Image: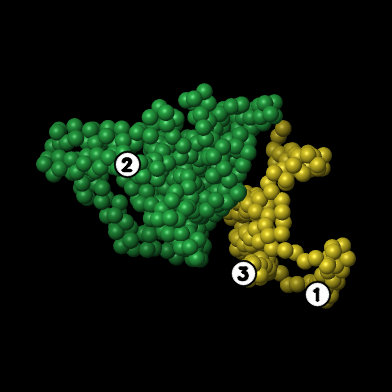
Chain colours: A green, B yellow
Amino acid sequence: MSFFLVAVIKALVLIALLLLTLVYIQWVERKVVAHIQGRWGPFRVGPHGLLQPFADAIKLLTKEDLIPPQAHRFLFLLAPFLAVSLALVSIAVIPFGGEINVFGVRTNLQLTDLNIGVLFIFAVTALGVYGIALAGWASNSKYPLLGALRSSAQLISYELSLSLGVLGALLLSGSLSLREIVDAQAGFAWGFLPRWNVFQGPFPQVIGFLVYLTAAFAETNRVPFDLPEAETELVAGFHAEYSSMKFAMFFMAEYANMITVACLATVLFLGGWRPPLPESWGIQFAPVAVFGFVAAVLFVHSQSAFSGKQQNSLRIFGVLAVLAGAAFVLPGVRLVFSPLFWFAAKSGFFLFLYIWVRGTLPRFRYDQLMSFGWKFLFPLGLLNVLATALAIALSS
Amino acid sequence: MDIFLFLTFALIAVGCAVNLLLQRHPISSALSLIGVMGSLAVLYLLLGAEFIAAIQVIIYAGAIMVVFLFVIMLLNAGVEERTRRSKMSSIFGLPLLAVLFSQIAVIVYRVFDHRTTVQFGGFVGTTQDLGRSLFHDYVLPFEVTSVLILVAIIGAVYLGKKEI
């Protein structure tokens, strides 16, 4: 009974956090892209546009829900549901931290630890293609169909490179369970270099990591590989005929996939929730320093704010950052939240990278995308697997 | 619980397989086939072979069926026209089907030991064991199979290419 209760509570907390991240990653993306382009981004709804995602949600919910008359009704309705549910499911096997003890109940900061966790994520993402392919086909319209065809071809091609990139890290860790993979990356070489798979011998997975990262951009349909929804040529690609909440579901699916891929990169290559330096170097106070720095930046900025309202909001956020930093001084809080902090920092870095690339790089042409995937990324991934396997075989 | 899940997914698998034959649109048939693959994966999972279940989903449902769907969408295959059945099939079809099923039943009964029944979760084989038997004990058949597949790929490229 207690097991059931704990599982339900963990699932609820996880879903709430995931949806909150989903909502706010869009706000962060709009803000970051706006600042890259020298704009303000959302600013009207709430302080610094912080309530903008909710305004968007209300707008999308109240829009008219259209189904094209020539569409295949059942598949047209099924496709967005399939896309979003499969995208949300894969978060269940990601480990966010070690074992914690809350009110006498010992539990892992992970919904469930499958011993085929990596394969589970690949199975779920492999099925995610159907959401896009069926959406394009069921719309019975030329642009969505073209988008769906491109998307299926792209996902099949890049899934190979993605798996090959991961394979090297799996060889090093010797397990398919994500928790065991993180545990295998514990500790430090020479007292300071973390044994993460990107650094760990006998063959550091730098190439595998880059292959994974590049393929992940294609796998989540993001710039510079967002051919399935290239708006300049295909209107909106596979979801051109969708409106209202069904459109929002595709949107959510895309961001959920981004989060999954970022979390998986953290777990497989960057040691999951492990800190980057040993405790003897005082790394346990890094969260305090980070929050303190954020607070300082906010306070300095509030001096040059152009209105009293903005000044107040910046100060309030500064005080919140100070409080968060102060909480990390307490040993009990630190024990529970420190892993979460490092996990969030690492996967947050990947999410920022996505946005950064979107604000910087132009889109590939379709033939470039295909030849890059098959003629460069795929052989590179194969070579990396070969070299890793050879190094492990020779060193053991 | 296990029995309940087994019966549910076995029924779904059979239902999807029948639906695959009855549907007249290729997309609906392909989707039914995905349903069959998915429920087979659940049956593997019930037996305790989680690696095979995941591979079943990744390879069959996630890769092969996507290519099927891709080709159907690319060729824009329409609803197939129903032809009138041939007399031979309506006369001999059902009896021959019955013969086939009884043959399979007899062979299964003879070959497999029927004192022990299948246990749910009874398959004890970790991913390591599977890898060891594939790449160590049965490495020659495994490699020969991969050469066979390579031959098929080369053949497909040769046939598909207009000029070489």
In the picture of the structure, the residue carrying the numbered disc 3 is: B1
The Cα–Cα distance between marks 2 and 1, rounded to whole angstroms, is 76 Å
10 Å crowding of disc 3: few (<14), some (14-19), many (20+): few
* Relative height, residue A69 to residue B87 (above, below): above
Q: Given this view, does label 2 or label 1 mark the residue nearer the observer?
A: 2
* Relative height, residue A111 to residue A391 (above, below): below
Residue A317: image x %, image y %?
A: 22, 42
- How many marks the image carries: the answer is 3
Q: Nearer the viewer, residue A55 or A282?
A: A282
Identity of the residue drawn at 63% across and 60% down: B42
Query: Is residue B88 left or right of A178 when viewed as pictured?
Result: right
Q: Chain of mark 2?
A: A
Residue B104 visible in the snapshot:
no
Identity of the residue drawn at 47% across and 45% down: A98
Query: Is residue B122 left or right of B8 when viewed as pictured?
Result: right
Q: Given this view, does label 2 or label 3 mark the residue nearer the observer?
A: 2
The Cα–Cα distance between marks 2 and 3, rounded to whole angstroms, is 46 Å
The Cα–Cα distance between marks 1 and 3, rounded to whole angstroms, is 35 Å
- CB-based contact (under 8 Å), mark 2 and mark 3: no
In the picture of the structure, the residue carrying the numbered disc 1 is: B94
* SS for callout 1: helix
Identity of the residue drawn at 61% across and 26% down: A202
Kind of residue indicated by mark 2: Leu
Q: Given this view, does label 1 or label 3 mark the residue nearer the observer?
A: 3
Q: Nearer the viewer, residue B50 or A329?
A: A329
Identity of the residue drawn at 53% across and 26% down: A189
In the picture of the structure, the residue carrying the numbered disc 2 is: A330
Kind of residue indicated by mark 1: Leu
Which residue appears farthest toward the right when viewing the image?
A: B110
* SS for callout 2: loop
Q: Chain of mark 3?
A: B
